[in-house]
Amino acid sequence: MSTNKPGTLELWGGLEGTVNRVSDQYFSQIEQNGHDRREDDLDRFAALGIRALRYPVLWERVAPHGLADADWAQPDKRLPALQALGVAPIVGLVHHGSGPMHTSLVDPAFPEQLAEYAGAVAQRYPWVEHYTPVNEPLTTARFCGLYGLWYPHGRDDQTFLRALLHQCKGTVLAMRAIRAVNPQAKLVQTDDLGKTYSTPELADWADFYNDRRWLAWDLLCGRVNNEHALWSYLTVRGGLTAEELLWFSENPCPPDIIGLNYYVTSERWLDHRAERYPPRYVGVDGFADIETARALAVPTPGIGPLLDEVWERYELPMAVTEAHIDANREDQLRWLLEVWNAAQEARRRGADVRAVTVWSLLGSFDWNCLVTECKGYYETGAFDLRSPVPRPTALAGMMRELATGRPLSSPVLQGAGWWRRPGRFLCPPAASSGSLAALPPERQSPQRPVQPILIIGATGTLGSAFARICEERNLSYRVLTRQEMDIADPASVEAAIQRYQPWAIINAGGYVRVHQAEHDEARCLRENTHGAAVLAIACARHALRLLSFSSDLVFDGSKGAPYVESDSTAPLNVYGRSKAEAEQRMLAIHPDTLMVRTSAFFGPWDSHNFVTIALQALAAGERFAAADDLIVSPTYVPDLVQACLDLLIDQESGIWHLSNGEALSWHQLAQRVCRLAGIDAEGLEACPATAFDGKAAQPRFSALGSERGILLPTLNDALARYLQTAAKLSESGAAQKAHYGGS
């Protein structure tokens, strides 16, 4: 990493290392993501093409009980390894933390204690050049001092400003201690880069927030004096003394690089019409505070104008030190591209923008509740940790392309991110008025012809679900009937490919009548096996991605435990044999095929699945029989489709098992959903499979496990969301009937 303005924009990476405190409990991202147990992570990171890595050497983890008992084992291994790989570490010392148990952000001794730790780090690694002693001091101070989320759980301006002051003073003293060892050490000072807009009635609030966002950088640059816009707020309302504030003017420590962290939540809209918004967005002062993307009819231009503001204010080198969005895979790619392009444009306008940092390479945990609980909510990054080893996602591929200047190859970049789509609103959209009026309209870049995904199976459960979710995710698609593409007819397949020019094909159709297949073997094999092979041949010839589906019925059930991808197939019936043969032929013809085995569909959008039928019957007081000797792994269709689309975009291939991960009988499934729905299951009968009029032999235990990754949520989570969605659809249907006079 160069200290002078590089000729090209650099790509950096970040490792989420937050150690925050809630009451007396510490939440450590490194413990959750397992990085401390995987030395080969650094090789993975270096292969992305990054020039620098924001790397945690955190006070709370290394020296929680003081320097005398410090454990340097991890940084002793990792920092030299990064150096040897040609990746410059940007060492972080406190990341959304409050220090070890014996101190806190409002402890007057915090700055000196942090400086002591920083000096010890520098003494141990004197070659390290770039440091972030405290990540996002302003944001951390808000969370722990204004909002009460993190320790010491303050909810007032005094606690907020005291925490901010101590973090900034700690940064100055830490850099002083570091530079005593390495005079060339550089400060990379990060904070959230945001901006607030409002209705005219709340313009004073917006002005205050927009002045407040600069406070950490202003303090470090020695710009806070009695002429500062917030001097009265800091001294009168905040209780800080002039001596404390002017100390920074006498001891300035301007960042060598201003680190700008940018999220979809960074730009805010304030609205005095609180009744227009969901209650969770209305604060104690009675007005709504919501992301602009969810409220404004014309979205903001994004990070570009904000980079200009920072450059105009400080004229210091900048880097985007966190660029991340919790979204589907294609929107993660679109977000990074938008930030990257904005940084390039700012450089062309003369701003010294050094890099864009992909955050976080291993993803992050529980930020949907701001890390106040351990719920296990996981956001993927360049790697997905839900596999035995971190699995590179499409984001990793895009990073390699950006780092090497190669053309971006992902076809899903052609669409707009959700923050720019019409369906983003959580309320009636606000006009671009007030402080937003001067912003230019959304820029439109020339669009190439958008390549679609072809979805085979227009009338089936899977095909219609893919169409619905592709629409939601702004993925271009085309659902084809058999008349438009007969997959068993090579000429029909070729004609459809030539006509629509897809980048991928999803084979969600085929013969699905398991018991009838025993008497209709020729048709079953034509649609499921021969047609699948014809499709694979065409996709191999045209270098198209291909997603196809198989079944748990390729197994005979003799294992007595969940089957994984490498288990041998041994189907008991014609349908299972048609799927097993299709797997073999497709993967032999087109090894890049993504073959998903799944089982026991249920979902809110069709009325013919087991869960819906069972609930309707039992809710009506009818008797309902279910097999108690067939063990399956139920799969919630929306979860299946979302995961399949991510895997397709990631260019995954081979066999994957996808289900909601629990083995139980059909009878147990009916019991479970009745309990969650609050329905009396007295009419539910347990029967053997032989009691039903089925011709095909079925495996007694066909539940699916996985050795490649557990990508779908738990069954209880899926059933709860199924019931919520089904209830909303029922209410919507009833409302429509009432509107049109139906009965």
Image (cartoon, rainbow, N blue to C red):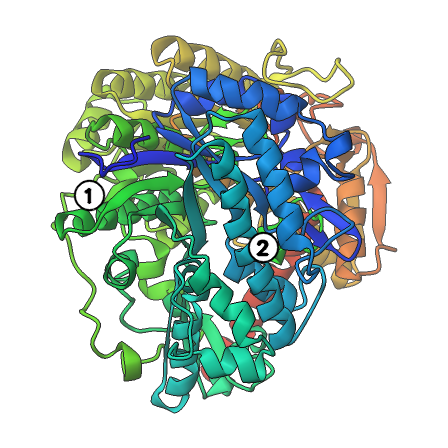
Residue 514 seen from this side: no
N-terminal of the two: label 2 or label 1?
Answer: 2
Residue 538 position (above or below residue 151): above
Badge 2 marks a residue whose secondary structure is: helix
**Residue at the farthest bottom position:** 201
Could you say which quadrant of the image residue 604 lies in?
Answer: bottom right
Q: Residue at x 28, y 64 (%)?
A: 313
User: Dot 2: few (<14), some (14–19), or many (≥20) neighbours within 10 Å?
Assistant: some
CA neighbours of label 1 inside 10 A, class few (<14), some (14 to 19), many (20+): some
Which residue in the protein does label 1 denote?
Answer: 450
Q: Amino acid at mark 2?
A: Asn
In terms of image quadrants, where is residue 193? bottom left
- Mark 1 residue type: Val
- Helix, strand or loop status at disc 1: loop
Q: Residue at x 44, y 61 (%)?
A: 250
Specify the farthest residue to the right.
Answer: 682
Give x and y (percent) for residue 300.
28, 66
Q: Which of these two is toward me, 536 or 235?
A: 235
Q: Is residue 354 left or right of residue 366?
A: left
Residue behind mark 2: 368
